[in-house]
Amino acid sequence: MRLVVDASIASTVHPTGKCRHFLDGMLRICHRAVFTQETRRDWRNHAMPIATKWLRSMHAKKKIDKIAPGELLPHTGLRNKISGCAASRKDRDAMMKDVHLIELALAMDSIIVSRDDTARGLFSGASKTVGEIRKVIWINPVEEVDPCSWLEKGASAEDRRMLGKLGEST
């Protein structure tokens, strides 16, 4: 699977923490990380040294896919739809700051790895009216009991991780 790994993971990597464990799992297991110019810039600005080392290791194993802007699938009006369903200017600005993650996920395997629970909640709310994003998986490895087990099982698209299903009873 090709996972969009947000800079929030790179900026909080503790040598013994769950984010580090998750990144190590990605390195060990077959999954790949995808980056656009924008996500690479976020990583450069926020990554802790241990995350930078992980990124170099991923490059060495050829497990990084660099996606050019022309390779992203066009999602006609997606930004306008998401912006239009924001409850406030603050919410809209927060979603527009991270909408590139959604766009990249939709062009790849629809998986975002991020610690940004605020953005996840906002996009989950937006998914009620923006159908294109309902099946995007948003995983926060810090909240997971065993995130590497999820990776080992193929990073499956379980309902409880989909933006359109977050907060629903199972």
Image (tube, rainbow, N blue to C red):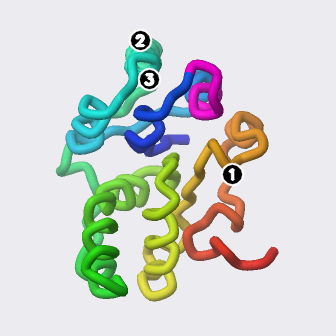
**Which of the two discs, 3 and 1, labels the residue nearer the N terminus?**
3
- Residue 63, label in figure: none
Which residue lies under the disc numbered 1?
Answer: 156
User: In the image, what residue occupies the spot 34% across and 83% down?
Assistant: 86
Residue drawn at x 55%, y 25% is: 14
The kind of secondary structure element at disc 2 is helix
Residue 157 percent location from the top left of the image: 66, 58
Identified by mark 2, the residue type is Ala
Is residue 17 magenta-colored? Answer: yes
Residue 123 seen? yes
Q: Residues within 10 Å of mark 1 (few under 14, many from 20)?
A: few
Give the CA distance from mark 2 to mark 3. Answer: 14 Å
- In the rendered image, residue 56, in percent from the top left (x then y), is placed at 38, 15
Q: Which residue is mark 3?
A: 51
Dot 2 corresponds to which residue? 60
Q: Where, by quadrant of the figure, is residue 92 drawn?
A: bottom left
Tell me if residue 76 can be seen. Answer: no
Label located before the other in sequence (2 or 3): 3
Q: Which residues are magenta?
A: 15-22
Q: Nearer the viewer, residue 75 or 170?
A: 170
Relative placement, left or right, of 36 versus 170 is left
The answer for how far apart the CA atoms under marks 2 and 1 are is 26 Å
Q: Position of residue 140 (x, y in %)?
A: 59, 49
> Mark 2: few, some, or many residues within 10 Å (few <14, many ≥20)?
few
> Measured along the vertical axis of the image, is residue 33 above or below residue 159?
above
Q: Kindly report which numbered mark, 2 or 3, lies closer to the viewer in this rendering.
A: 3
Query: Mark 2 and 1 residues: CB-CB less than 8 Å, in contact?
Result: no
As displayed, is residue 82 above or below residue 99?
A: below
Q: Amino acid at mark 1?
A: Ser
